[in-house]
Image (spheres, rainbow, N blue to C red):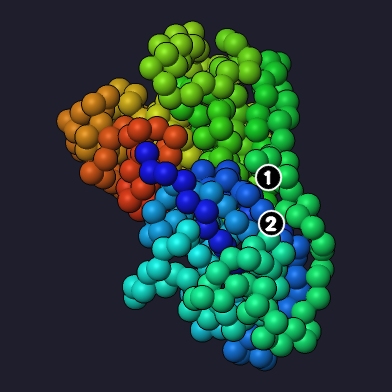
Amino acid sequence: MAEPVVAGLGFGANLGEARAAIARGVQEIERRGVGRRLALSSLWRTPPWGLTDQPEFLNACAMIETRLAPHELLTALKTIERDLGRVTSERWGPRAIDIDILFYGDTAIDDPDLVIPHRELRNRAFVLAPLAEIAAARMIGGVSVAAALERVDLAGLTILEEGDGWAGAAGGNDDMGETITLTCRDGAQISAYVARPSGKPKGGMVVLQEIFGVNHHIRAVADKYAAAGYLAVAPALFDRVERNVELGYGADDRPRAMELRSKTRIEDTLADVSAAIEVAKDGGKVGIVGYCWGGTLAYAAAARLAGVTAVVGYYGGGIAAMVMERPRVPLMLHFGERDKHIPLSDVEKIRAAQPEVPVFVYAADHGFNCDERESYDAAAAEEAERRTMAFFAAEMK
């Protein structure tokens, strides 16, 4: 594993809920395992720079410790920007969220897509002012941040919220998620992790767990959908068997996970999913996304449950066995060609039985979407997520 590196990040926004977007961006960096927050500046209000005919900006800076290489970090930050509503805009123009790499250890990079240290860093008061709060002695191009700050015009810059508390606690998830109780149609009660968007939801999203419970990864997935504007609900599908199951991905976790799954009944599990759908309806039209065991359950939900608009399943090993059940709503499926648990013959069986269902196969292993597994594949995960988000956006509009 790569040695950790201290990187400096700059945040800015001036469209929509700018404060919420920046706070969410700060939190997402830790939630997604991009880096550990070391320091965070105050939140500043600053005049626009470069293109002045636009609203004022909010800006902040953070220092993180990351094990990602520079271009991997850039990709991760661009994904967060996209999930928070960033779209391509004119240079220096208004934006929903902007996250820049200001420095990365002592590394210097000058590539077409990445320049470190940031080329305009020493000239931008809206970056230097917050950065000086947390890294005044940092040298940028032979000049300290504090010295560079003395050379720029600070007119119009004001602190909106002083200190680092405005974005929530480092390492915490209090900004997005909470655990609630669902009452199912048979009277059973289970817990669910719920993550809410900062503004009006554009839909509801039921997130179906792997066999490892509603663990850190599944909560992070729910948080990601909330960041993308959905009211996300992740029901604890083992609660009828054992409550508070939260397993990892070590050698000792899988046997325990398989044992728990063997004790579930699909009728009960789909009743639990139905209860989650009812809560997700508060966000509007409801989508379902499931992973591993949850991918199989997602297919079953598409075929059997009411109240759903669109469904996506990732590497569901049990789908081939139920493939003659026709989905009643639009469905998309993702598999890995190196998946030892799901032979490609099963994937072809699914394609043949349900030719109208888009089925994508990636050069990856089982669990490629989970960044806490050894089988995580960033390229496959990013491409599958892009297709998934576009699919939900089109089907749930």
Please indicate whether residue 14 sits to the left or right of residue 392 in the image. Answer: right
Residue at 44% x, 16% y: name it: 253
Is 302 on the left or on the right of 125, as rendered? Answer: left
Q: CA distance from mark 1 to mark 2?
A: 9 Å
From the viewer's perspective, is residue 90 above or below residue 130?
below
Image spot of residue 47 (x, y percent): 72, 83
Q: Which residue is mark 2?
A: 40
Total marks drawn? Answer: 2
Relative side of 159 to 177, left or right: right
Q: Is residue 107 visible?
A: yes
The residue where tag 1 is placed is 170
Q: What is the quadrant of residue 10 in the picture?
A: bottom right
Q: Secondary structure at mark 2?
A: strand
Q: Residue at x 30, y 38 (%)?
A: 335
Asked whether the beta carbons under mark 1 and mark 2 sit within 8 Å of each other, the answer is: yes
Q: Residue at x 60, y 72 (%)?
A: 144
Residue 321 is drawn in which quadrant?
top left
Q: Position of residue 49 (x, y in %)?
A: 63, 86
Q: Quick one: quadrant of the C terminus? A: bottom right
Q: The disc labelled 2 sits on which kind of residue?
A: Leu
- From the top left corner, tell me how far across and down residue 124 is, in percent: 62, 81
Q: Amino acid at mark 1?
A: Ala
SS of the residue under disc 1: loop
Pick the front one: 341 or 42? 42
Residue 345 shows which numbered tag?
none
Provide residue 163's location: percent of width, then percent of height. Answer: 79, 58
Between 54 and 5, the residue placed more toward the observer is 5
Could you classify mark 1 by the number of other residues whose Cα lies within 10 Å: few (under 14), some (14-19), or many (20 or more)?
some
Q: Earlier in the sequence, mark 1 or mark 2?
A: 2
Identity of the residue drawn at 51% across and 75% down: 142
